[in-house]
Amino acid sequence: MTLTAWATGVTSALTLTLGLTATAFAQDVPDLGGREVVVVTENAYPPLQFLDKDGNAIGWEYDAMAEIAKRLNITVKYENISWDAMIPAVSEGQFDLGMTGITIRDDRKDKVDFSDAYMRSEMLMMVRGDEERFTDAVTFAANADLLMAAQPGTTPFYVGVYEVLDGNEENPRIVKFETFGAGLEALRAGDVDLVLSDSTAANGYVSASDGGLKIIGEALGAEDFGFIFPKGSDLVAPINAAIASMKADGTLDALNTKWFLEYKMGE
């Protein structure tokens, strides 16, 4: 066999294999016939979902949901709600799906069903750029004058309570805010000294802060994000199939590059 013939055979085999793989993925993702799916979000967790300077709702999750809608042939209708009301509202069936960088936790599985994880992130400590009084979780906890901002009911709140401080959810050193953004503004203003955030958001904020913010210490653990549904929802399996196909063909990696490397917060 000549080299040319061998190369042609390999190319043909590779093309056939890729074609069969793509066909298999297409067959695994069902067609839901244009079904309307009501998705609720918070628009307060950049770069996953937020409002840009012109008031447009954008972000990683919006792009991901648009691709999921295309693959499943669904029509997405968006609604907005606060974080503290989201899980109860989805649990009661007011919405078909919730998305706002929701950590997959066993205690939440009693109320809602989760999709498979579409992202893994680490919890990081974010401080002002000139902070020198502490350098990690241990030195923060040791100084009783230091305060941390947190949004109750979120993973950063629980990590702050149980991994940074003393396990008391009413510890006065935890200043509670209704939104993540409000806590971040308090950090910038000097009203608090620490904000915990997953790496997906923290790195974006730091890179856009022009030295105003920095990350200190080591990561405090990893978390997986998933979409939430009312218990027993028939959308879980189709959404999981779409997520799997997007992982397999590189779509999720492309979204990560766009929103965590290329996108500049505030521009």
Image (cartoon, rainbow, N blue to C red):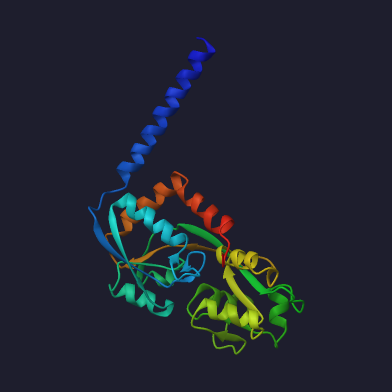
Residue 126 image point, x, y percent = 64, 72
Res 161 seen here: no
In this rendering, position of residue 248 left or right of residue 135: left
User: Residue at position x 34%, y 39% from top?
Assistant: 24
Residue 51 image point, x, y percent = 46, 70
Report the front residue among 27 and 213. Answer: 213
Quadrant location of residue 213? bottom right
Res 27 seen here: yes
In this rendering, position of residue 211 left or right of residue 167: right
Q: Find the residue positioned furthest to the front.
A: 54
Quadrant location of residue 136? bottom right
User: Residue at position x 58%, y 86% from top?
Assistant: 175
Report the front residue among 46 and 104. Answer: 46
- Count of marks, rendered view: 0
Residue 142 image point, x, y percent = 72, 82
Q: Find the residue positioned furthest to the right.
A: 132
Relative to 229, is 9 above or below? above
Report the front residue among 1 and 180. Answer: 180
Residue 32 image point, x, y percent = 25, 53
The quadrant of the picture occupied by the C terminus is bottom right
User: Residue at position x 55%, y 61% from top?
Assistant: 121
User: Residue at position x 38%, y 69% from top?
Assistant: 109
